[in-house]
Image (tube, helix red, strand yellow):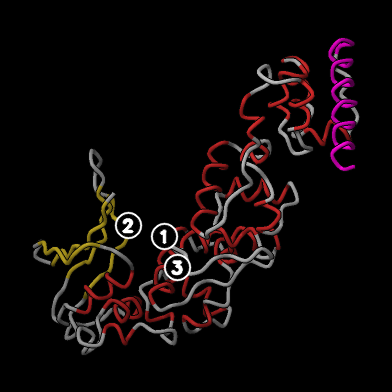
């Protein structure tokens, strides 16, 4: 989808003012107009095969003409200030007043009622508080986010710890694909900019720091998140010069080409349940996954589900005994 800025004069003449890259680009286009032009400045959303959609309209009125008192504030915001074409970048700053922006009257009244006067004051609010206000929609929030970004500001992080973690993760992911420095072991997982599903799975599993995450192998990590999330996590770690633990060569051979005892020695408490199908059987593995068993450690520490048949239960109990014996031998 493409967005363009178009001037429709009172005589229905069309003038293309340029592409809409951000709210700052639209203000630059308004600054290039002289005060005697009358018409509407439109922001059009163009998508192939669909009709154009008008997402924003700014009405330009003649300075010498009479103003309707009811529309005086809107005309004041729509009419470019003298010299705006030369000093448009200086006009948008953290100290720019909110009522100078082309926002809906309902949004302006909400900001005035909460004592927000400048963009710097607006940056003290979390974005979630704007979404909760009746009268402030998606278009207004996206426009304010673009304006704050153009002056080097952004909305405050949310107060909720879980929401703040995802907010930090989104900010880091939006910074780009080339980080400036490596990430430390004690840094939070949100410093990597993972996919939301990967971050949720990691925090649900208790992985709080980068050191906790890199202690897993790709196979162990696939037991708590999807393959796409594992692939993205591996790529994000590579960007920061980190990597997951390598897989065991014996495990890569697959069960059946090596002895059962050797295969058990290659397992850990983090091994996904679905990788134990050779030992447990298809029915037992499906029943354990349906009951919420994600890794081999869950089988060792939790009570087995009642849906297991006697044959499957005996096979699982044998596996528990063999794995526990293998772990104790390796620790010794």
Residue 149 visible, this orientation: yes
- Say which residue appears at 11% left-offset and 64% top-offset: 15
Q: Secondary structure at mark 2?
A: strand
Q: Is residue 43 above or below residue 306?
A: below
Q: Residues within 10 Å of mark 2 (few under 14, many from 20)?
A: few
Q: Which residue is mark 1?
A: 139
- The spot of residue 295 in percent (x, y) is 76, 34
Residue 286 visible, this orientation: no
Magenta highlight: main SS: helix
Q: Residues within 10 Å of mark 3 (few under 14, many from 20)?
A: some
Q: Which residue is mark 2?
A: 55
Count the numbered circles shown: 3
- The spot of residue 6 in percent (x, y) is 19, 62
- Say which residue appears at 47% left-offset and 65% top-offset: 179
Is 36 or 269 nearer to us in this picture? 269
Q: Which residue is mark 3?
A: 145
Q: Is residue 83 above or below residue 150?
A: below
Closer to the chain start, of discs 1 and 3, is: 1
Closer to the chain start, of discs 3 and 2, is: 2
- Kindly report the distance in space between the C-alpha atoms of the residues bearing marks 2 and 1: 8 Å
Q: Residues within 10 Å of mark 1 (few under 14, many from 20)?
A: few
Which quadrant does the C terminus fall into? top right
Would residue 174 be found to the left or right of residue 125 on screen? Answer: left
- The spot of residue 21 in percent (x, y) is 29, 64
* Highlighted range, magenta: 309-332
Is 95 or 157 nearer to us in this picture? 157
Q: Find out whether the residues at labels 2 and 1 contact each other: C-beta distance under 8 Å.
A: yes
Would residue 11 be found to the left or right of residue 196 on screen? Answer: left
């Amino acid at each position: 989808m493409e967005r363009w800025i178009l001037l429709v004069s009172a005589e229905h003449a069309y003038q293309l003012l340029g592409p809409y890259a951000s709210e700052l680009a639209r203000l630059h286009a308004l600054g290039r107009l002289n005060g005697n032009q009358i018409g509407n400045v439109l922001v059009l959303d163009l998508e192939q095969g669909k009709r154009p959609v008008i997402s924003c309209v700014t009405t330009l009125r003649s300075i010498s003409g009479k103003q309707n008192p009811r529309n005086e504030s809107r005309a004041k915001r729509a009419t470019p200030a003298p010299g705006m074409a030369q000093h448009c970048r200086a006009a948008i700053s953290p100290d720019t007043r909110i009522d100078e922006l082309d926002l809906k009257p309902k949004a302006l009244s909400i900001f005035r009622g909460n004592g927000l006067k400048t963009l710097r004051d607006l940056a003290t609010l979390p974005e979630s508080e704007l979404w909760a206000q009746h009268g402030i929609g998606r278009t207004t929030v996206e426009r304010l986010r673009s304006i704050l970004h153009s002056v080097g500001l952004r909305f405050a992080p949310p107060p909720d710890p879980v929401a703040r973690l995802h907010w930090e993760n989104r900010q880091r992911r939006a910074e780009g694909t080339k980080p400036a420095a490596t990430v430390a072991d004690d840094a939070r997982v949100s410093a990597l900019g993972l996919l939301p599903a990967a971050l949720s799975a990691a925090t649900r599993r208790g992985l709080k720091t980068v050191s906790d995450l890199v202690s897993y192998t790709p196979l162990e990590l696939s037991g708590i998140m999807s393959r796409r999330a594992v692939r993205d996590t591996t790529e994000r770690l590579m960007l920061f010069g980190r990597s997951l633990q390598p897989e065991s060569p014996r495990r890569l051979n697959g069960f059946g080409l090596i002895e059962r005892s050797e295969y058990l020695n290659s397992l850990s408490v983090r091994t996904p349940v679905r990788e134990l199908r050779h030992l447990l059987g298809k029915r037992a593995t499906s029943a354990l996954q349906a009951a919420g068993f994600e890794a081999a450690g869950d089988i060792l520490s939790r009570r087995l589900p009642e849906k297991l048949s006697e044959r499957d239960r005996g096979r699982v109990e044998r596996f528990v005994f063999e794995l526990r014996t293998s772990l104790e031998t390796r620790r010794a």
